[in-house]
Image (tube, rainbow, N blue to C red):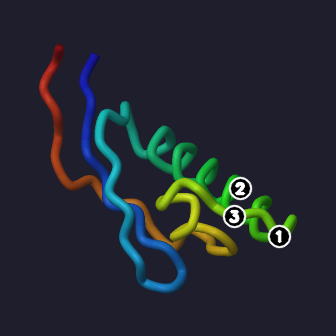
Amino acid sequence: MRVNKYAVTLDNGDVIRTSGTRNEAHARQIIEQHIENGTSAQNAGQPIEDSTDERCAGRTIDSVRLVERGRWG
């Protein structure tokens, strides 16, 4: 399976890079999960333990861009 690297830009301009993602939809799904995790913890007043969850809390995805096309493996 081919895996790629994507740059996902959030609505505040912050860029989260993914690796090992199959396609744009997969990269979007991964970041949406970080958004959900961080926002849920933030709303519950709980500490956010994962740094990516913290960066994504309360944000939305602005764009997804292919950074590097992977090899078949």
Name above or below for residue 18 compared with residue 4.
Answer: below
State the image coordinates of residue 52 (x, y, percent, origin top left): 48, 59
Return the residue found at the far right. 44
Residue visible at 67% across and 61% down in the picture? 38
- The residue where tag 3 is placed is 47
Q: Are marks 2 and 1 in contact (CB under 8 Å)?
A: no
- The residue where tag 1 is placed is 45
**Which disc is residue 14 wearing?**
none
Crowd around label 3: few <14 · some 14–19 · many ≥20 (10 Å): few
Looking at the figure, which quarter contains the C terminus? top left
Label 2 vs label 1, nearer the camera = 1
- The residue where tag 2 is placed is 36
State the image coordinates of residue 18 (x, y, percent, origin top left): 34, 49
Q: Quadrant of residue 23?
A: top left
Return the residue found at the far bottom. 12
Comes first in the chain, label 2 or label 3: 2
Q: Amino acid at mark 2?
A: Glu
Secondary structure beneath disc 3?
loop
Q: CA distance from mark 2 to mark 1?
A: 14 Å
Q: Nearer the viewer, residue 47 or 56?
A: 47
Q: Amino acid at mark 3?
A: Pro
Label 2 vs label 3, nearer the camera = 3
Q: Nearer the viewer, residue 37 or 68?
A: 37
Secondary structure beneath disc 1?
loop
